[in-house]
Image: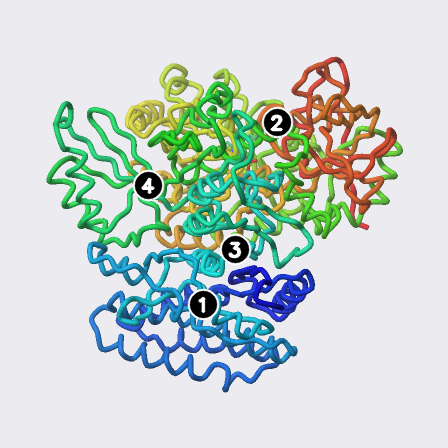
Amino acid sequence: MSESTPWVVCKFGGTSVSSRARWDTIAEVVRTHRNEGRHPFLVCSALQGISDQLEVLVREATDGDPRPTLNTIRDRHRALAADLEVDAETTLNEGFERLESLTEEIMQEDSPSPRQRAAVMASGELLSTRLGVAYLSAQGVPVEWLDAREFLRAKDDANVPPRRQYLAATCASHSDPVLQSHLNDNPDTLYLTQGFIASNALGETVLLGRGGSDTSAAHFAAKLQAERLEIWTDVPGMFTANPSEVPSARLLRRLGYDEAQELATMGARVLHPRCLGPVKRHRIPLHIRSTEDPKVDGTIVAGDGPDVGPHVKAISAKDEVTAVSMDTLGMWQEVGFLADVFQIFKHHGLSVDLVATSEANVTVTLDPQANALDADVLDRLLHDLNQYCDAELIRSCAVVSLVGRHIRSLLSDLGPAFEVFDEKKVHLVTQAASDLNMSFVVDEEQAPRLVRELHAQFFGAKAPDAIFGPRWQELVDSVDADGRQPDAWWRDRREDLLTLADEQSPRYVYSEATIREKSDDVHALEAIEQPFYAIKANPHPDVLRLLEEEGVGFECVSPGELDRVFEAVPDIDPERVLFQPNFAAPEEYAEAFERGVHVTLDNVQPLVERLAIFANEEIFVRVDPGEGHGHHRHVRTAGAQSKFGVVPAELERLRAAADRAGTSVVGLHVHVGSGITDEDTWADLVDFLASLATDFPDVRTLNVGGGLGVPDRPGAAPVDLDSLNDVLNEAAARHPQYTLWMEPGRYLVAEAGVLLAQVTQTKAKGPVHYIGLDTGMNSLIRPALYGAYHEIANLSRLGDALSVTADVVGPICETGDVLGHNRQLPDTDPGDVLLVATTGAYGASMANHYNLRPPAEEVLLSDD
Ligand code: LLP
């Protein structure tokens, strides 16, 4: 190495410095750069999770007992030292002692000062870099530890509140010939320093804001006039969407500085937005790479490149955003209103992100990354704003943004994606003056679905090119070839399934063992006295017999379903059967009473007009709690848009009618939708029903419905039955006088079922490759009806490399006859058997004979 050897600054994030394997990758990166004639300079973050622990420590130092957290922090570092085989005492003791004395100092205070907080938080990087230096030098690398605070000096600005000066300081980014010549004195030494920390004019420690290590690295790149900056993290670059939400997200191979800045600001957590300024100013290319997958080239952020017209590069989402809505009638034609209110934000040290104004309202968002949004600050802000207007906080918002160039001209493409908002509110829409983004502020829970819809619209069928690289799925699959549902039962039963498909295709196959397993899960809900299976999910007689053996009851919604239950299980006690139709002819209720099953009414009219049918009977009443939930608007079965249930305001009328008829209301029922994963939903419904039951003295049972979701795609969250058990137990304890029932459908059978179909033809048409099957929307209509996702695998070639991206389609004469878009599959030929997973619920039961093509027949696969 010589003085003219170019510098490369490499920043390693929390996960990249937290294990020996990752430090070996770092050593490898250093070697590669040296071999290729570059002089590496390393900037490291704290171990993963340590900054959070340090925040807890600061809190506990004034408000509790900080010792357990201090021990956790020490243990984490000692464990890594042991893993790296370096001496923990000599490497870490000085840092530990400093942290202990800072903690003791804070314990004397009522609340920690920003200076003290910064000093504690800096410990994470100081400790991790000590470990790194010890390990690399033990590996024979000549390495020197640099204290970043000696070289990174924060800007001194008396107008900035102390909080920001210490916790979110800014530095100037200049070339630094002094540092360059200092480092060039020992050209063979590797220098390793800390991210996130700097010093002020008094020599005190300050921070560059959470995630500020990227910014530190960018400043060092500018100081050294580096040939490039590399940000090494746990994902191999920036993607067209967050890959954990959208597995088909594409790697962005190249981005301009402005686009990357926009994406980083809009929530892509790979880069800290502030790091782009220095590299853009000095025209230093920035490479994003992954220590998990160092071979992938990643994203290069460099000069803006040619303008290729309107282009969406990514859909981003940023959550935990707080919006502030300010209503005022006095603003119209008023001079200075905006100046006044923005002055208040400034006064509280809050930086405003998005703004929308009309003559009667101004709404802004506050980004948690840029602001310390604790309750006190927000209370004071509201108090001051209320002097000028009627201000209100809207918590738990998400900002969903389209990022790219000339976004305005793409408005007409957006229409269908906004179907999601039929029932939900968009709090704010803004379009950046730079035309680099368009943003929508929505409730946080709406964001993932909106992102998926927008992503499918803009990137669904895009072929790879110089900008759009491989899909996240492909990158993962190259490591773990088609192991997306590695535990699925059907992998172990592949031979049996192929035999079954050989005998007959298409075919639904249900695993008996899986249904039994799921039934055990449901029985394990201690608060639920009796589970009922909603047979609409899958009324196959063998499935019903199996579940009856398991002690599950049945929920029916039509005379046909009642017939099916009594045919399949003739001896069943009618007490174990519910009849809960919607808009049924009154005679249906009469027949159900005849059979002796429990009857649920969800409208007052039949009771008022056909009193005789209900006279002296016992009924349940289905109530509408006002808000539905679920995976698609068609399956949200409560709220103004849904036809189900009696609204609470009507219950008084119902009670009067029931009294007249001598009908006794013995239970209340609610079912809010299907495919729900938030466990609190059902506990809240217990409270809701219990609050209404006080007006119905005969009510003994509360039925909180079904709707338990199952994961449909990699990384999707299942409903967690353990926490459901906990919250239901708590709810049951609040209302011990009632018996609780539930009626899941999907949960019991979805994962037990697969659809097997044979490939009839394949075709390439333009950029799209098609794989055609002997059945489609006539067997499985969920993808066409709800955009539902079902995993698809080539069962004949399970484990082969995934080499094609194809739309998997059926033979029905509709363009919507697609079972899966853009699926990664191995080379596939006619005759191969494809498996469509998680189709045990609402597959065969919703099948149809469209085009007079009979849907797949069904078979139960018994245990080995
Ligand atoms: N109880 C009642 C009153 C219901 O209406 C339903 C489903 C259930 C229980 C069972 O819900 P589950 O646990 O299966 O989510 N075809 C749609 C699902 C429609 C659900 C209709 N009602 C789909 O394929 O996603």
Viewer-nearest residue: 301 or 460? 301
Residue designated by label 3: 722
Q: Dot 4: within a 10 Å radius of its alpha carbon, few (fewer than 14), some, or many (20 or more) residues?
A: some
The type of residue carrying mark 1 is Leu
SS at circle 1: helix
Residue designated by label 1: 179
The type of residue carrying mark 4 is Asp
Where does residue 703 sit, x and y in percent of width and height? Answer: 45, 39
Residue 618 visible within the image: no
> Is label 3 or label 2 in front?
3
The numbered disc on residue 561 is 2
In the rendered image, which quarter is residue 711 located in? top right
Q: Earlier in the sequence, mark 3 or mark 2?
A: 2
- Is residue 278 toward the left or the right of residue 159 in the image? right
**Given contact means CB atoms under 8 Å apart, are the residues at marks 4 and 1 in contact?**
no
> Is label 4 or label 3 in front?
4
The type of residue carrying mark 3 is Asp
**Residue at position x 74%, y 34% in the image:** 755
SS at circle 3: helix
The numbered disc on residue 353 is 4
Where does residue 2 sit, x and y in percent of width and height? Answer: 60, 68
Q: Earlier in the sequence, mark 4 or mark 1?
A: 1
- Above or below, 110 against 533 in this view is below
> Is label 4 or label 1 in front?
1
